[in-house]
Every structure is written in structure tokens, then in C-alpha cells.
Amino acid sequence: MTNRIALWLGALLILLILADVLADDGRILLFLAKKTADLVQYVAFWR
């Protein structure tokens, strides 16, 4: 991955997070955080 691609992906990620916070009060980010925590718990069980 080149620096240019990494910068574009980072900028896109920041824009999507900003759009979620402004349009939906961060509900999508909260949902993803909860699902990630569930996944970590599930993977830790199989460790």
C-alpha cells in the first residue's frame, strides 16, 4: 500500500465517521463497537 492510498483511505474513514456522528449521533459507531466487543469475547472463549 502506498502512502497516497493510505492517506485516501484514512480521509475516507474520517469522513464516514464524521458523517455518522453528524447525521445519526454516532449510532453506527456504537453498534460496531458493541459487535467488536462481542467478537473479542467470542474469540477469547476459544483461546
Image (cartoon, grey):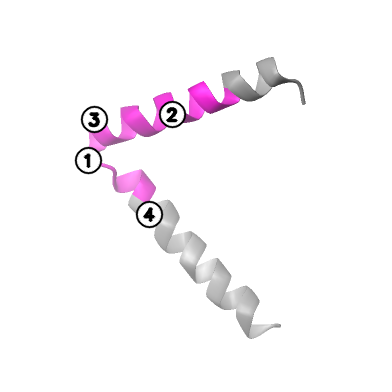
Which residue appears at 49% of the width and 30% of the height? 13
Local packing at callout 3 (Cα closer than 10 Å; few below 14, some 14-19, many 20+) is few
What amino acid is found at the position of numbered circle 2 in the picture? Ile
Task: Tell me if label 3 and label 1 are in contact, CB under 8 Å.
Answer: no
- Report how far apart the C-alphas of labels 2 and 4 lie in the structure: 17 Å
- Report how far apart the C-alphas of labels 2 and 3 lie in the structure: 12 Å
- Report how far apart the C-alphas of labels 3 and 4 lie in the structure: 16 Å
- Report how far apart the C-alphas of labels 1 and 2 lie in the structure: 15 Å
Residue 25 belongs to the span the image colors magenta: yes
Give the image quarter of residue 45.
bottom right
Quadrant holding the C terminus: bottom right
Left or right of 30 in this view: 2: right
Residue highlighted by disc 4: 31
User: Depth-wise, is mark 2 or mark 3 nearer the camera?
Assistant: 2
Which residue appears at 59% of the width and 76% of the height? 42
Up-down relation of residue 3 to residue 18 (above or below): above
* N-terminal-most mark, 1 or 2: 2
Residue highlighted by disc 2: 14
Q: Where are the magenta residues, as a range?
A: 9-29
Residue highlighted by disc 1: 25
Query: Which mark, by number, is residue 38?
Result: none
